[in-house]
Image (cartoon, grey):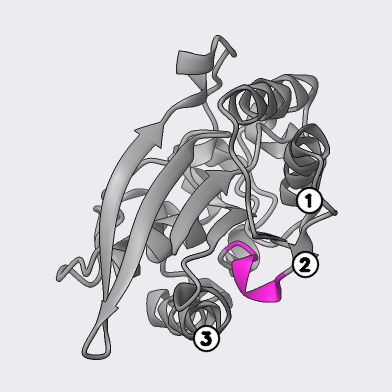
Amino acid sequence: MELLIVRHGESVANAEGRMQGQRDYPLSDLGQRQASALARFLSGAGYRFDACYTSPLTRARSTALALTTALGLPEAELEPSLAELHAGSLQGLTRAEIAEQHPSFMQRGLKGLGDFAEYGGESYEDVQRRVQQLIERWHHRHLVDAHRVLAVAHGGVNFQLLKTLVCDPVPRVMSVKFGNCCATLVRVRERRGVYLGELIFHLPVDLLGAPTSEGMVGVF
């Protein structure tokens, strides 16, 4: 199986520097242009997919629609397990508001990012479990037949997907930045019950000629 993991284009909340989590925000004008740029690239490069999935959140669904339309594919299937990490009481807050209301979060290192249990959201392990269960389902649907799968989601959950597939032994470090509309291709094999992921490429959208943006802490 080959899995193309895409982060949504810039959202209105990204442009405003807000922590999104599972709050629903549309794409900004820039985000729409980013999605169009990636769609043109995939179409021009002749990419074809056997299955397409998207987070149910609007920013991901709109990005997925731009891609499937350009590729002449049916709309992507909604997959709840691709929803972004729930960030609890931090959702909707700007960086300045988080610093004022929750200063301890801003002082966290890489090991603390991606864990929102303290704020009424999901823990790092919560998200890890749902991603692992999703990969198991995809294994039964797609791995045996060597399908190519498109998944459009979010920075936090995409990191967990990549981490699980490449067997990263470090359990709690958010060490990869997924920019808006970046695309990451992973080739997945299974050996004796272990998934072996080979990173083929990680493509930032600015290499496609689309402008980039600075969102909240790079993910979420």
Left or right side of 19 for 163: left
Residue furthest left in the image: 169
User: In the rendered image of this protein, does residue 62 appear above or below residue 15?
Assistant: below
Is label 1 in contact with label 2 (beta carbons under 8 Å)?
Answer: yes
Label 3 and label 2: CA atoms lie apart by 18 Å
Marks 3, 2: nearer the viewer: 3
Q: Is residue 80 magenta?
A: yes
Is label 3 in contact with label 2 (beta carbons under 8 Å)?
Answer: no
Residue furthest bottom in the image: 193
The residue that mark 1 highlights is 61
Question: Which x, y percent locates residue 90?
Answer: 59, 59
Question: Which x, y percent locates residue 160?
Answer: 40, 65
The residue that mark 2 highlights is 78
Q: Is residue 15 magenta?
A: no
Foreground residue among 164 and 1:
1
Residue 140 marker: 3
Using a 10 Å C-alpha cutoff, classify the residue at mark 1 as few (fewer than 14 neighbours), some (14 to 19) or many (20 or more).
Answer: many
Left or right side of 216 for 187: left
Going 44% across and 64% down the picture, which residue do you hit?
1
| Residues drawn in magenta | 79-84
The disc labelled 1 sits on which kind of residue? Answer: Arg
User: In the rendered image of this protein, does residue 83 appear above or below residue 33?
Assistant: below
Using a 10 Å C-alpha cutoff, classify the residue at mark 2 as few (fewer than 14 neighbours), some (14 to 19) or many (20 or more).
Answer: some
The disc labelled 2 sits on which kind of residue? Answer: Leu
Q: Secondary structure at mark 1?
A: helix
